[in-house]
Amino acid sequence: MKSLFEASAAAMLALALSAGLAAPVWAQSHWVATWQASPQPVWGADFLFPTYVPAALNDQTVRQVARVSMGGERLRIVLSNADGRAPIKVGQATVAQPAGEGAVAADHPRTVTFGGQEAATILPGASLLSDPVALPVPALSQVAVSVYLPHVTPMQTFHWDGRQTGWIVAGDQTRASVLQMTAQSSTSARLLLAGIQVETEQPARAVAVLGDSITDGASAGLDQDSRWPDFLAARLVPRGVAVVNAGISGARLLSDGMGANALARLDRDVLSQPGVQSVIVMLGINDISWPGTAFAPDAARPSLDEMKAGFRQLIGQAHSRGVRVIGATLTPFEGALPDTPLDNYYRADKDAMRHALNEWIRHGGAFDAVIDFDAALRDPAHPARMARRFDSGDHLHPGDEGNRAMAEAVDLEVLLPGLDDPLAMMEEVAR
């Protein structure tokens, strides 16, 4: 059902067109989310994993590379200070086509403005959306985003496991085609950059994937764009559908951890992303397995009923915004994380709860559709384990071939009914 605003806008547009007037600017632009890195709070030195980022930046440039799903003639970037406690001053930002090893194409990078100004401030707890930038970006291609921070800037918001090399260099090098690497450092974490949107000629749809480290790509090849949502994007982009990855390593449905719980970040990471019509939810293994490990030694495991209630609440909130919700079963993990401080992540009683939750996801009728990743990745001869050819080696996270198998297991029609019918697709976008 259309909102009052949408109905009024449609009526105004029809009236203008019937009178022979040009469509207003808001009716000519169609923006869709095409890439995302969900923000997380930077944790302290006492946490199990290092952050891989400096405590603060000062008079430094951060250059990062991101592979978009859908392409377009113009783009916008989103910078985040979601967990910051002080404003962040951005001195300059640019976008360009990357040329490898931190370099960008020889033709000059495009300046990014915010409200017409090159400098901007990201307020604490807020995000910053840029003005449109005229940089044609083909589908499934990479974009280099450079941001200069002129003042001392504590790093309080990041995305920990970016699976992509970025560079931190001295001074304002936002317009440099080749970075001067003096006092250079690299990181695979994401800083500031939280999203990219592209403009399309016709309204486009997007699928968001809300998940944990398996979705985030914890064992995907570095700089290879081989997370399972990346492979899914390669299948969906030819059909005019973008994919945004809202995975956070360590994410849980019901509790905070290496990021906010799913319900706390649902609006920001999924429902507010332009063009999102469906969300795939693959969460729960950390809710089941974190308690009792070095992550949460004294925490109590949630009950199956509590997990079901959490999923139902997530589904209800998504449905209230007209977003379709597809549940994904949890993959096998027997023997997970051997020879690590988390070698008790797997236990038989935890696996029993995974099985019970999977059965509810498959047959409980709460979701609009189901993707059975458990069936896609398990070893037929030993169903509690992931098949060897799909296993990254830690028995929890799939490797690149496992990620590819997950993407191929997705029935595209259940994501967005009418995907092969252009007329039905246009009607769905208009609703």
Image (cartoon, rainbow, N blue to C red):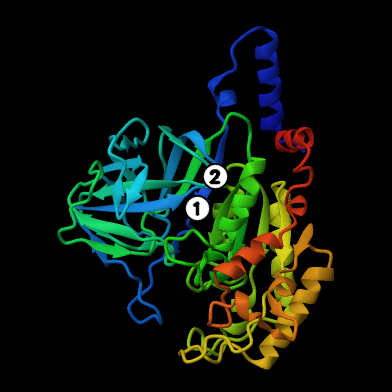
Q: Position of residue 422 (x, y in %)?
A: 75, 35
Element at badge 2?
A: strand
Residue name at image x 47 percent, y 57 percent: 37
Q: CA distance from mark 2 to mark 1?
A: 8 Å
Q: Position of residue 356 (x, y in %)?
A: 77, 80
In the rendered view, does 155 fall on the left or right side of 259?
left
Element at badge 1?
A: strand
Q: Position of residue 379 (x, y in %)?
A: 70, 81
Is residue 169 something that shows in the picture? yes
Mark 2 vs 1: CB contact within 8 A: yes
Is residue 241 something that shows in the picture? no
Compared to 21, does 146 lie above or below?
Answer: below
Mark 1 residue crowding within 10 angstroms, few (<14) / some (14–19) / many (20+): many
Residue name at image x 69 percent, y 47 percent: 321
**Which numbered tag is attached to residue 379?**
none
In front: 284, or 237?
237
Amino acid identity at mark 2? Ala
Residue furthest to the top: 20
In the rendered view, does 49 fall on the left or right side of 4?
left
**Which numbered tag is attached to residue 33?**
2
Q: How many marks?
A: 2
In the rendered view, does 413 fall on the left or right side of 207?
right
Q: Which residue in the structure is indicated by mark 1? A: 36
Q: Position of residue 349 (x, y in %)?
A: 69, 91
Mark 2 residue crowding within 10 angstroms, few (<14) / some (14–19) / many (20+): many
Residue furthest to the front: 389
Residue name at image x 55 percent, y 28 percent: 29
